[in-house]
Image (spheres, helix red, strand yellow):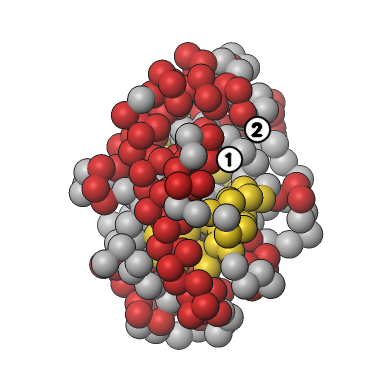
Amino acid sequence: MTPFRFYLDWHVDCQFAGLIWAGEQGLYGDAGLDVDLVVPERHPEHTVLDLIAGDPCSAGCCEDNLVVQHGADGKPVRAIGAMLQETPLVLMTKDGIGITAISDLAGHRVAMHADGENLLRILLRLNGVDVDAVDITVHGWSLDDLAAGRFDAVQGYAITEAIALEGRGFSPRLVPLHHTSLVPQSQVIVTTPVCLSSHEAILRRFLAATAEGWRQALAQPDEAAAMLAATCAGRTDISENRRILAMMTPLVVGAKGPQGICQIDRGRWRQNITTYARFGLVARQFAVDDIVVDLFT
């Protein structure tokens, strides 16, 4: 078996159901791979992009804006796939606040994760909102702060964190974090040029097994929900896991259907890179081929 590390940008949860299934059902083993899913808690001071840069036989996942920034800075990164074809990134707010769209955020207090701050700033400008009119906090907050009224809206994943709030008796209103000129892609699978040149066959086997893991998990949601309950801390409710998988299915499958799972959308990346450059997230426009490699061809 060939050891291979995959660095997660979040702890093991339902959003990684395809990888968990591929490991538990032996799909990675059948591909000759001993895959270690590395959670952020094991390297709390380093980002996924830092970790793959120092590991010659690895890949990881993160949001596309981080990948674009990394590549524009001349750092070694290549996007080779995406576990989610549609982004679950949202702002979560509550009724009565007056926020139904990005254009309503002026004068409000908003909490974001580090991977979403720049995305929000660009979306505000795309919607004609003065960024300085929005009170944005990036560190030192939790979901409880929304329910307590410390913030008017907070960044979240519609597939997990909204359900977490509902479990606390709080029903959030969800505001999508995208625009016609900027459609982020989440859980982007990234590696380095060094890994590609030395281990392309391993990367292809990993991607194929991961995609098949997603197809099987979504096709057998009851079994997948039970597996997640047994492997994910805090996800012991099988019915809740089943609900999350149902919500994830259109995000994972996208417009191409099951055969397009984990594939990367070059046209979307070209558009997003152009928008990121237009609003200064990156200092220069660059070709999609400089950062995206299609290993499904």
Circle 2 sits on which residue? 143
- Quarter-wise, where is residue 205 in the image? bottom left
Q: Residue at 39% x, 40% y: name it.
A: 214
Q: Quadrant of the C terminus?
A: bottom left
On screen, residue 7 versus residue 43, left or right, reads left
Residue 242 in percent (x, y) is at: 43, 20
Q: Earlier in the sequence, mark 1 or mark 2?
A: 2
Cα distance between the residues tagged 1 and 2: 7 Å
Residue 185 in percent (x, y) is at: 40, 55
- Quarter-wise, where is residue 44 in the image? bottom right
Q: In the displayed structure, would residue 291 be above or below residue 45?
A: below
Q: Amino acid at mark 2?
A: Leu
Decide if residue 131 is in sight here. no
The residue closer to the viewer here, 256 or 107, is 256
Q: Amino acid at mark 1?
A: Val
Q: Residue at 31% x, 29% y: name it.
A: 219
Mark 2 secondary-structure assignment: loop
Q: Residues within 10 Å of mark 2 (few under 14, many from 20)?
A: some
